[in-house]
Amino acid sequence: MDKHDQHDAHHHQGNRIEDKRLITGAGKYASDWNVAGQLYGYFVRSDRAHAQIAGIDTVAALAHPGVKKVFTGEDAVAAGYVLPPHSLTLPGKNGSKAKPTRRPVLAQGKVRFVGEAVALVVADSAAAAQDAAELVAIDYRDLPSVVRPDQALEPGAPQLHDDVPGNLLFEADAGDEKEVEAAFAKAAHVTRLKVESTRVSPSPMEPRACLVAYDAKADSYRFNVVMQGVTTLRKQISAWTKMPEEKLVFEAHDVGGGFGQRTVAYPEYCALMIAAKALGKPVKWVSTRIEAFLTDTHGRANIIDGALALDAQGKFLAMRLDWINDMGAYLSPGSVGHIRNTSVCMTGVYKIPALYATFRAPVTNCTPVGSYRGAGRPDIAYAVERLVNQAAADIKMDAAELRRLNFIPPEAFPYKTPTGSTYEIADLPGLLSKALKLGDWQGFAKRRAESAAKGRLRGIGISTVIENTGAGNADKDEVEIRVDGTGVVEVHMVAKTQGHGHETTLSAIVANTLQVPVEQIKLVQCAPGNMLQGNHTGGSRTTVGAGSVSYLAANKLIEEGKALAALEMKLEPSQINYAKGEFRSAESSRALKLADLAKAKPLKVVAEGKFGSTFPNGCHIAEVEVDRDTGVTEIVRYCAVDDCGEVINHAIVEGQLHGGVVQGVGQVFGEHIVYDRESGQPLAASFMDYYMPRAGKLRELKGEEHPTPSKVSPLGVKGVGESGCTASLPVLVGAVIDALRPLGIEHLDMPMTPSKLWHAMQTAKA
Ligand code: MCN
């Protein structure tokens, strides 16, 4: 079946195969795993932002009934589990490299953020482990702390690591400084704007959990752990613990959300390995929600100072960006995405001839930062789109028209950006026109007047964004298809759904290619012990990668089936036709089903592929009303036109967009990890004080597709998992600022809380 039939066949597939299991409580999550004789771990965590550890007294804890052992940093050092791997291998300024941070899996000598694991208490019940943990006495000597990344770089700031002078982990630049200087010198207008993409907690529903069993005979470990795919996690745990990858076996069934946070190796998993080996029994740990806030990697956390140079007609001449990326106390294993991705799409959807950007990544006494849905793409889109809006206001030009004037034109694709990326294909003017119509851009003035009559400030925002999805770190993506004598088609891969609906979409790709009912397909992700290669699910790459290879594997199965059928029928493979699960030939009256061919020996094919980046893009338009008396913002319209290439399942794509947009809503209107600047204590570490967007905050999302099929993937698909997040930050903040601009307010940083807006409006009035 060619990809166009494939596309049609997928139309109107609504219900997701996995939903019945997931919403009737029949899912099996990491903390549901239990094995006979297991012990329970509880971590004693630092309650200081920065302190020397003068001593740890475990006597009382050890005497507590049920306690088996207490592990500390000395055990971690003895095991050699001290240097986490990291992926920040980008070339730095003047050939420099990122400075790796030593991080024993249990703190040794010093703690550097609130929540850092200091000791692991293992007991025969979870309650006993927790009770005993309270008896561990740690003698701290407090040190001054620093929680703001810009302050961490100032002279005289408290220093976190002896081998990271000035707290500067990594420094880099991109583009041509001289060219940019020259362009700014001759510009008719320069717009400047400094914005912050705030530190947030991704907060998947399922907290982390891990059960580790050690097999002394094989000297191997088995993990039941929440994950986004096995390959990255296995590689990182192997690097941290120096255990060969084949000695680390992982099993997970359902995963309750990931958002990037569930990709990486965490110290707790390695500490559990130490305990399981020492005690000869499996050890289980389930994170509490407060531990999730304190120790799961945070997202975003960067400050971007931007400037845009324009000529007298409004054409962009050059852009300058200065980034400070807060990395937290240690370089997380998932450290690179949110830095690399910013540079991949640094000029957004615009033709900007000259570009210069500098990056500095300091350490701070905060939770380590890693990838969060979009990983750098929302941050760069936010900085660039806010700059463009500000420029439009500065030169008094319509924000949509300024965009249209500066778009990369359709005929310029494939388009090479100043930072060396090649955008494959997009139709930006078409996208914009569709969105302006859907969002009734022209009718806004009237709606603004109607809102004003009710005493409300109405604003409109627009964002036009592009992002890279698809390419991964793995050498290739592999998919294995097995068919047995019953006709069940098992599809194996190492990506891992966390709620994305892969059982529906990836099964559909195989079912449609084989022209068999989808019920015949069984998707198996990350089967324990299966050493297939491939990328974890992240970077919106599963459909482009594993999805495309599923299609190739199904076609390979048909070809191999033809060869086998030909042998059976004593014909040539070229004489065999395949349709709807059956092999036939004009030369024979026989018909052989896939199952018939698999009776004697199961059929098995492995296909592989290596794909570059695809570039989904979109135009979102939103309107808000701000209540002058309370500062409360209502999102009154939200329209999204997106190009993710060919769509496998329309309902799922819409759901992905909706979810991404609402995560943006969360960051824009309330989510914020704040630390006290004096003590370094986190001030929002539970859902009592950390905002979560509710369904009512975004009542309706009107979406339309505007596909330009990708040739990178044989299915024509581009990723979509992060698109909503990327477009929503600038469009919503843009709408709020547009509402407040008549009062003279040009900039506020997220989150747009009622109190912040109320104070800004009061000050503006005065
Ligand atoms: N899809 C489709 N047609 C396309 C593109 C995608 O039907 N042209 C479908 C896919 O088959 C898949 C879903 O949309 O079911 C998302 O696909 P894709 O864009 O390939 O992204 P991934 O599957 O690789 O998911 C990763 C992405 C990321 S990086 C984050 S973070 C994120 C996200 O997806 N985390 C999520 N969406 C999430 N959704 C849920 N429910 N939970 C998370 O943790």
Image (spheres, rainbow, N blue to C red):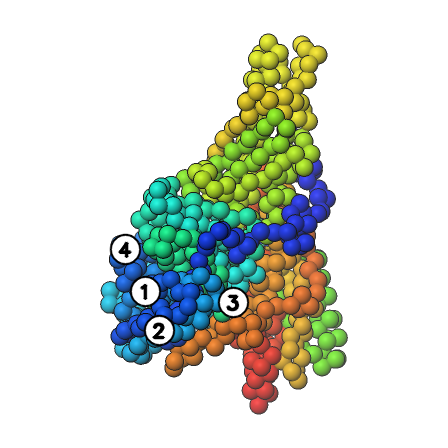
Q: Give whichever of discs 3 and 1 has the lower sequence position.
A: 1
**Which residue type carries mark 4?**
Gly
Residue 676 can be seen in this image: yes
In the shown orientation, is residue 269 left or right of residue 398? left
User: Picture coordinates of residue 455 (x, y %)?
Assistant: 71, 81
In this view, 106 is above or below 54 = above
* Numbered disc 3: secondary structure: helix
Q: CA–CA distance between discs 1 and 2?
A: 15 Å
Between residues 674 and 702, which one lies in front from this camera angle?
674
Seen in the picture, residue 138 relative to 261 is either above or below; the reply is below
x and y, in percent, of residue 708 in the image: 60, 44
Mark 4 crowdedness (10 Å alpha carbons): few <14, some 14-19, many ≥20: some
Which residue is denoted by mark 1 in the rendering?
72
Residue tagged 3? 289
- CB within 8 Å, label 2 to label 3: no
Nearest to N terminus: mark 4 or mark 1: 1
Task: Name the residue type under label 2.
Answer: Ala
**Total marks in image:** 4
Task: Look at discs 4 and 1 and give the one toward the viewer.
Answer: 1
The quadrant in which residue 599 appears is top right
Q: CA distance from mark 2 to mark 4?
A: 27 Å
N-terminal of the pair, mark 3 or mark 4, is 4
As rendered, which of 166 and 500 lies closer to the eye? 500
Rendered residue at 26%/57% (across/down): 78
Q: Which residue is mark 2?
A: 60
| Mark 2 or mark 3, whichever is nearer to me | 2
Q: Is residue 436 visible?
A: no
For ligand 1, tell me if the residue under mark 2 lies within 8 Å: no
Q: Nearer the viewer, mark 3 or mark 1?
A: 1
| Residue 422, position as x, y percentages in the image | 46, 46
